[in-house]
Image (cartoon, grey):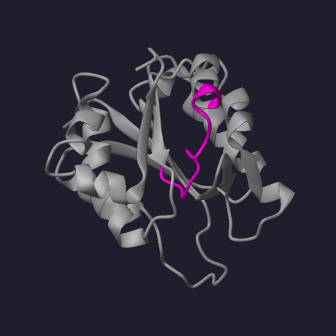
Amino acid sequence: MSRGGVFCVEGQWARDMTSRGSVLPTLELLERIQSIRYIHKDVATAQELEYYLDRWTLKQYDDYNVGFFAVHGEPQRLLLTEFNHHDNTIELDEVGEILAGKCPGRRLFFGSCAVLKAPDRMLRDFLDRTGAALICGYTKAVDWVEAAAFETVLLDRLVNGKRVDSAESTMRSARFAPFADHLGFRVVYRNGR
């Protein structure tokens, strides 16, 4: 079993409360094949997100070094539900403020449409503020099933990659590069790469 793990906060994908859409099957698959361990928390408000991010950054969760934000998104903003209301949206820079100085060496993945469609300077400031080793995610609107397939490989590499760039080198390989480009996958490193 991997020593690292994924801490996932998942927003509410649909207005219909009977909808069963979730990233849990992806996390469960990776755990069943002993690739990762995970913690999964549902969030619907910015206050819930802040609460769980504060908990995640406690020392007892240091082994969960990958943060996975599975929520709706638009450029530089997380939408925790389908309703675009101030209680359930949060700007990327506000997430950076919550995590300020609390993520040394952690890897942050925004599995959200277009959130990483942001200026390089903003993402580098986010990394400097949080101390995270990298931030990655999508710059385009993505299809649910395609993203789930991509994320299955990506999460394994983010958790188990020996080097900080292991995930990107895999996703930019001849096998995955067209898929990564199709989804608008982007990685920015704290070290400036």
Span highlighted in magenta in the image: 109-122
- Residue 66, x across and y down, in percent: 42, 35
Question: As displayed, is residue 37 above or below residue 125?
Answer: below
Q: Nearer the viewer, residue 149 or 46?
A: 149
Q: Nearer the viewer, residue 42 or 182?
A: 182
Residue 173 horizontal side relative to residue 188, left or right: left
- Does the stretch in magenta take in 115? yes
Query: The C terminus appears in which quarter of the rendering?
Result: top left
Q: Is residue 180 visible?
A: yes
Q: Is residue 28 visible?
A: no
Residue under the image location 77 percent in, 47 percent down:
47
- Residue 56, x across and y down, in percent: 56, 33
Question: As displayed, is residue 143 above or below residue 113?
Answer: below
Residue 50 horizontal side relative to residue 61, left or right: right
Q: Main secondary structure of the magenta part?
A: loop
- Residue 143, x across and y down, in percent: 43, 70
Residue under the image location 58 percent in, 70 percent down:
13
Query: The N terminus appears in which quarter of the rendering?
Result: top left
Residue under the image location 46 percent in, 67 percent down:
22
Question: As displayed, is residue 174 above or below residue 128?
Answer: below
